[in-house]
Image (cartoon, rainbow, N blue to C red):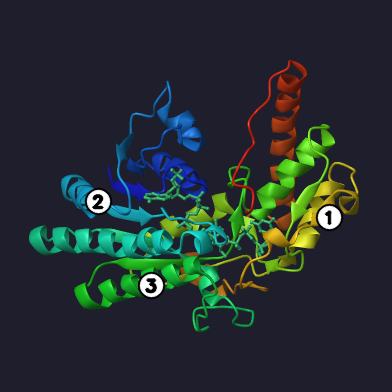
Amino acid sequence: MKTALLTGVTGQDGSYLTELLLERGYMVHGIVRRSSTFNTNRIDHLCGEEAHPHLTLHYGDLADSIALSRLINTLQPDEVYNLGAQSHVKVSWDQAEYTADVTGVGVLRLLEAIRDVQERTGKGIRFYQASSSEMYGSTAPPQGLATPFHPRSPYACAKVYGFWQTVNHRESYDIFACNGILFNHESPRRGETFVTRKITRAVGRIKMGLQKKLSLGNLEARRDWGHARDYVEAMYLMLQHEVARDYVVATGTAYSVREFAQRAFALVDLDWEEYVEVNPKFFRLAEVEHLLGDPQDTCDTLGWKPQTSFDQLIEEMVETDMEMARRERVLHDAGLSLCLAGVGNE
Ligand code: NAP
Ligand code: GDD
């Protein structure tokens, strides 16, 4: 039985990858940050009352190199997937140093712990780094492996650092380390402050009479949006391949935020223009206008291809968020309400 260790197990991708690895017979260990409220809702079906016997959670943090080293040394996993990060681009301007530490230096901490085990015991540990299309920033589309990076946020700068540390450990210490440069991927489990989920949550709440307007920032930004479930399959395939290298994971088609909103509202027979308003507080200090990936080489090398179309992705998200809004409506009518407060500028 193979063993995998995941950072970011409580996140969108972590939850899908955990399901995939458990289905494929892995023993899965996940690192969870201690929080004052529960943060395991995306994996509660795997670690709640009927816990999966092959999933174990450990407290840890990408800022805590001793805890990371101890875990890697004790578990000596076959594969490490680094999905943990302060992953919100706009928040990274507010928390630039923290983002550099966790999203950037966190990668180095993991790689050094792996190197230590490999040098002392000879045990090879394969490493996946969740690199990002944000690294391309303002370079013109389409973006592929040969495209230069031009990061446009503290988050993207931290990801560039993590990318090169991964390459460097592969070249210096012969660690089987791969960067997956993933373009945006979404799902009903997407965090509610990323634009797609912010839109589909609002669609559900507006349709159910729980919200009046949706405030967004730049409607013209274009993204290559895929489904997280498809993308975790690519991560897994990278670590099964005979050669360690880097990959671009994308659909090869981009749409604007405006088009996403238009289609999401239309699914519940609403005209988006009646509800969406533009608020400058959601604009970025430096915007990434157009991300469009070229996944051909990845498809050829790994035999991977995206399974979910743009419209199917939106449909799945709207359907789930309509259901959530129906339940919220029942609570609301009973005089109870869910707290939806965030900081509010994401
Ligand atoms: P996500 O939903 O925001 O999940 C991030 C995960 O990182 C969560 O489990 C979070 O824990 C954890 N985390 C945050 N700070 C941490 C810390 N200091 N120590 C340990 N763990 C920490 O992100 P995602 O969408 O699943 O993305 C997964 C990875 O892929 C991230 O590295 C992201 O930057 C990268 N990426 C994402 C996309 C995309 O479009 N989704 C594209 C390219 C790259 P809590 O649950 O406690 O917050
Ligand atoms: N979040 C947000 N909120 N974005 C908005 C809004 C809004 O109200 N209005 C417009 N946008 C625009 C942003 O300016 C950006 O151009 C685009 O929508 C996508 O924003 P996000 O959904 O926040 O994602 P992102 O592209 O910045 O970052 C995501 O994808 C990266 C991969 O390219 C994150 O998942 C990163 O972690 C990931 O690396």
| Residue 212, quarter of picture | top right
Q: Nearer the viewer, mark 1 or mark 3?
A: 3
Dot 1: within a 10 Å radius of its alpha carbon, few (fewer than 14), some, or many (20 or more) residues?
some
Q: Is residue 119 visible?
A: yes
In this picture, is 109 found above or below 193? below
Q: Quadrant of the C terminus?
A: bottom right
Q: Quadrant of the N terminus?
A: top left
User: How far across and how far down the image is residue 156, in percent?
Assistant: 49, 69
Q: Is residue 191 left or right of residue 87?
A: right
Q: Which amino acid, mark 2?
A: Leu
User: How far across and how far down the image is residue 42, in percent?
Assistant: 51, 37
User: How far across and how far down the image is residue 296, in percent?
Assistant: 57, 73
- Asked whether 230 or 129 is in front, the reply is 129
Q: CA distance from mark 2 to mark 3?
A: 19 Å
User: How far across and how far down the image is residue 285, in percent?
Assistant: 61, 70
Q: CA distance from mark 1 to mark 2?
A: 44 Å
Mark 2 highlights which residue? Answer: 68
Q: Secondary structure at mark 1?
A: helix
Q: Is residue 240 left or right of residue 157?
A: left
Mark 1 highlights which residue? Answer: 262
Query: Which numbered disc covers residue 161?
Result: 3
Q: Secondary structure at mark 2?
A: helix
Q: Are marks 2 and 3 in contact (CB under 8 Å)?
A: no
Residue displayed at 91% across by 50% down: 274
Among the two numbered marks 2 and 3 on one chain, the one whose residue lies closer to the N terminus:
2
